[in-house]
Image (cartoon, rainbow, N blue to C red):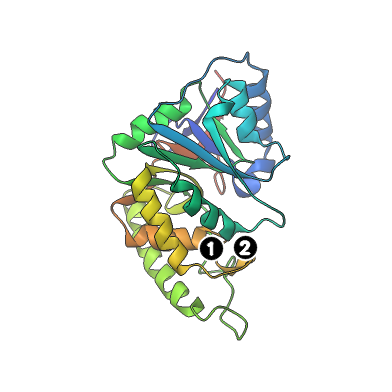
């Protein structure tokens, strides 16, 4: 069983059922088939740290995947609190990255990500190394936050952060970079913050830059797409050292896809 990105033909080892895709029948089928298989011993390269964010005592899909491969001790879980604050993903990652001693680091959302294959993380690392960049973020078809519809973006008003207009104007420039991926023939043009891999010390700098621009205190996801809008800004500033996985060679985001773009194949 595997997922294939139909445009590129790629078979990525890490699948993210972000947005409404997690409620699709094919995802339920994939999860059921995955955990029906006999557990096998997994592995994670000693040069790679894998991290996620999760609320303590709430068991997640990603943790269950790592348990299935008997490598749960290889997953670093950053504790989150309720109500879930997306900008705390940035704040806490910035803090935890300082403690990571491996050369590479990968971060995956906890509730809707699956790793396919006992060596899924190692495969992701090898494919990342082949790209000769500093970091790779997963790419998706859906635009979030959405400039055209205004979804995920708070309109500037008296109660909004003073930087709101500046963020929106910069996001317009980000969308021009997104168009490069479209020009190269991909429908997966927008960076998604739910899965990424990179050089550890570089990502420490990346998140330090994020810390310089995000507002303080709890913020609703609709402020600027949660953490995603801000990550898109910094990624665009650092392009081409930071790129989107537009061919889904490492990560596949299912939000917004049809069978024309992605498909579950049961062999």
* Residue at x 55% of width, y 24% of height: 71
Disc sitting over residue 109 in the figure: none
With respect to residue 138, does 176 lie above or below?
below
Q: Is residue 29 left or right of residue 243?
A: right
Residue 38 found in image quarter: top right
Estimate the spatial distance between the alpha carbons at disc 1 and disc 2, rounded to whole Å. 10 Å
Foreground pick, 159 / 94 = 94
Q: Quadrant of the C terminus?
A: top right
Looking at marks 1 and 2 on the same chain, the residue that comes earlier in the sequence is marked by 1
Residue 110 in percent (x, y) is at 61, 41
Residue 39 found in image quarter: top right
* Residue at x 56% of width, y 49% of height: 256
Disc sitting over residue 221 in the figure: 2
Residue 216 in percent (x, y) is at 56, 69
With respect to residue 208, does 199 lie above or below?
above
Q: Which residue bears the numbered disc 1?
A: 145
Foreground pick, 244 / 227 = 227
Residue 249 in percent (x, y) is at 40, 36
With respect to residue 200, does 172 lie above or below?
below
Question: Badge 1: how crowded within 10 Å, few (<14), some, or many (20+)?
Answer: many
Secondary element under disc 1, as helix, strand or loop, is loop
Q: Is residue 177 left or right of residue 113?
A: left
Q: Nearer the viewer, mark 1 or mark 2?
A: 2
Secondary element under disc 2, as helix, strand or loop, is helix
């Amino acid at each position: 069983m595997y997922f294939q990105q139909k445009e590129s033909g790629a078979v990525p080892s890490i699948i993210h059922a972000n947005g409404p895709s997690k409620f699709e029948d094919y995802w339920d089928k994939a999860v059921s088939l995955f955990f029906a298989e006999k557990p096998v011993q997994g592995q994670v390269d000693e040069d790679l740290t894998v991290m996620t964010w999760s609320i303590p005592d709430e068991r997640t899909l990603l943790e269950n995947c790592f348990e299935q491969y008997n490598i749960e001790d290889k997953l670093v879980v950053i504790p989150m609190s309720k109500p879930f604050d997306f900008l705390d993903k940035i704040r806490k990652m910035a803090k935890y990255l300082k403690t990571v001693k491996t050369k590479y680091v990968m971060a995956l959302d906890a509730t809707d990500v699956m790793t396919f294959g006992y060596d899924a993380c190692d495969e992701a690392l090898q494919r990342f190394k082949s790209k000769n960049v500093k970091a790779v973020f997963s790419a998706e078809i859906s635009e979030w936050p959405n400039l055209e519809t205004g979804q995920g973006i708070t309109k500037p008003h008296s109660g909004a952060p003073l930087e709101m207009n500046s963020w929106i104007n910069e996001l317009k420039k980000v969308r021009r970079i997104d168009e490069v991926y479209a020009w190269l023939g991909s429908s997966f043009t927008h960076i998604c913050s739910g899965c990424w891999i990179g050089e550890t010390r570089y990502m420490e700098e990346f998140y330090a830059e994020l810390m310089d621009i995000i507002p303080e205190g709890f913020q609703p996801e609709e402020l600027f797409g949660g953490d995603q809008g801000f990550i898109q800004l910094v990624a665009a500033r650092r392009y081409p050292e930071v790129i989107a996985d537009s061919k889904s060679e490492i990560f596949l985001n299912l939000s917004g896809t049809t069978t024309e773009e992605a498909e579950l194949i049961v062999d």
